Amino acid sequence: MRPRVIIVHGWEGSSEEGWFPWLKLNLEKDSIAVTVPIMPHSKKPTMDVWVNHLKKVVGIPDRKLILVGHSLGCITILRFLETLLPSQQIQSAVLVAGFGRDLEYPGYKGELKSFFQRSLDWKKIKNQCKAFIAIHSDNDQWVPMECNRLFVEKLGAKSIICHNMKHFSGDDGITKLPVVMDLLMSLISSK
């Protein structure tokens, strides 16, 4: 069974923004199957719609599946993992600029509240994925560093802190993300 990588973009994002096309192209050069789905209603996302869409994209989850999320894509991945049966475990989840609680910053009006109407089942999420990696920037204007610590504490995630990468978005000028490429190649070759 070949490894599969699915990259989930964030709020107001698209499959063609930032570093996603670069990562997809480079992984495909190594014959890795990559999907970057367009998440529905990205300007007004809701948890049920996004999680159900990810379920359709994933199909049958297996131990060769690696999920990569950016921002809201990360909480979508965590909510997806909550829905899996105990026998359905994936290989890894790479969480870039992710958060496990609702956001708090000037101007935020609770647009993502549907993702947080109930507490995360951290234990179940952790049991459904062999390894978690949390990547955050030391100057992210939207997602505070405490989100990295939360993933380490609740999921046993490996923590990677990058310098001056803001929110890792195309709007921040991030069109390549070698740290994620290197991680994925390491995860894939370790199987």
Image (spheres, grey):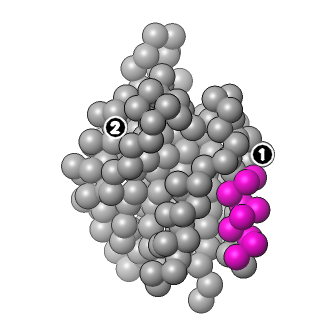
The residue lying at 53 percent from left, 76 percent from top is 188
Hey, which quadrant is residue 129 in on the image?
A: bottom left
Vertical placement of 77 versus 10: above or below? below
Magenta segment's dominant SS is helix
In the image, taking residue 147 as reference, residue 31 lies left or right, namely: right
The residue lying at 39 percent from left, 20 percent from top is 104
CA distance for labels 2 and 1: 26 Å
Labelled disc at residue 147: 2
In the image, taking residue 46 as reference, residue 144 lies left or right, namely: left
Kindly check if marks 2 and 1 are in contact, taking CB atoms under 8 A apart as contact.
no
Mark nearer the N terminus (2 vs 1): 1
Vertical placement of 122 versus 163: above or below? below
One can see residue 82 in this view = no
Labelled disc at residue 16: 1
One can see residue 127 in this view = yes
In the image, taking residue 97 as reference, residue 124 lies left or right, namely: left
Q: Position of residue 181 (x, y in %)?
A: 58, 61
**Amino acid type at mark 1:** Glu
Q: Residue furthest left?
A: 153
Hey, which quadrant is residue 123 in on the image?
A: bottom left
Q: Position of residue 57 (x, y in %)?
A: 66, 63
Look at the image and give the residue range highlighted in magenta: 21-30
Q: Position of residue 11 (x, y in %)?
A: 61, 34
The residue lying at 55 percent from left, 71 percent from top is 185
Q: Position of residue 132 (x, y in %)?
A: 38, 60
Q: Residue 24: within the magenta?
A: yes
Hey, which quadrant is residue 98 in on the image?
A: top left
The residue lying at 54 percent from left, 63 percent from top is 182
Q: Residue 18: within the magenta?
A: no
